[in-house]
Image (spheres, helix red, strand yellow):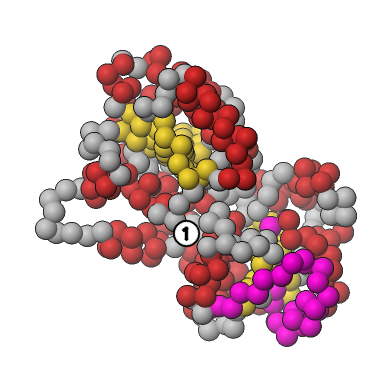
Amino acid sequence: MFVSHNLELEGAPKSFFILAKGFKKKGFDVDVISLKPGPLKVKYNESGMNVIKIDSFRDKFLIDVVSKYDAIFVNTISAYSFIKELYFLNKKIIWIIRESELYEYKNKFLDLTDDLFDKVFKVVFVSNATRSLYENGKVHDNFKTIYNGFEIADYEKYKKSHEDVSVNIFLKDKIKKKYGFEIYTRIVSIIGTVCSRKGQLEFCQAIAVLRTMLPEKYFNNLRFLIIGAQDKEIPYVNKISEFIEENDLSRNIKLLKETSKIYDYYEMSDIFVCNSYIESFPRVVLEAMAFSLPIIATKIYGIPEQIRNKKEGLLINAGDVNALAEQMMLVLNDADMARTLGENANIRLKDDFSNEKTFSSYLKLLEDD
């Protein structure tokens, strides 16, 4: 059984779905429980997995439902109440922790106590940096680190689906034209739910700084895409919109809704930015690595475990607007550096963060006593 807090097109639910699909492909019977609906339900169903919608992890009928499963995967710290209610069934519960803001959750949920982590079979963290926060200097025999993996086959399928030998044009240029951009336009993208911890406002502030560093004609050919606006974050989205208008940047910055066509945006991009304050091992970075993009990211928690500074990407301090502007200018002006960073990132993804490697680690985990 896979227990999810939601079925949205966000990093944590998407990574969870890929793991579930891996077990299904290996011949396991897999069902899914979720508190909230979302577009991933269709993908689960298409992969032959049944999705059960529940109102609360405290629903009493869950005891009977859960009893028939040999292993239970629980996604994110927000599902802690499922652990609290059902750990006594003595099942192989694998709790996957993806959040690095431990103390915020403990202050928010007073019944999220430290002893819960010792009541499950395994607690899996997606980065060593996040794991160290929860260990807090103590040894927990059931704590493990397994990096998120990326399905290289999905990227290859995307590329293949866009092959058209009759058209003599690069795919990147083809996708740019599809979305109304000129081929010569340089595109810098930041992808993910638009919210304060992702740093999109500071991204806009860095763009305003960058404008003062570049000739006007050059800057006018740049487009900065913020993809992932959602209705639930309207105040922050409005704040970004106001900054764009007040600084006369509407020509250059495009604030876009969350989309299932996200690979198109990676393909048309020339640079990828992850400007978060809090992450563990973000999927968007892995996706950018698959597309061989030069990456500029904040050096927080597990991101330095994904990309090494000046090798697979460029790392900056979170909230450093000037540094972000400087690094964007550096990559825009150095084509050789941009190409090398992107190529190195792609190699590291295939060597260290393939979905096959991640899935093998989870299979091995289930074999532990």
Give the residue number, with chain letter if any, for mark 1. 150
Is any part of residue 144 visible from this angle? no
Q: Quadrant of residue 334?
A: top left
Left or right of residue 85, residue 157 in this image:
left
Q: Pinpoint residue 66: horizontal percent, then vertical percent.
A: 75, 79
- Membership of 190 in magenta stretch: no
Q: Quadrant of the C terminus?
A: bottom right
**Closest to the observer, 324 or 122:** 324
In this view, 215 is above or below 47: above
Residue drawn at x 28%, y 41% is 180
Identified by mark 1, the residue type is: Phe
Q: Which residues are magenta?
A: 49-77
In this view, 365 is above or below 131: below
Residue drawn at x 60%, y 34% is 236
Residue drawn at x 66%, y 46% is 129
Residue drawn at x 31%, y 23% is 220
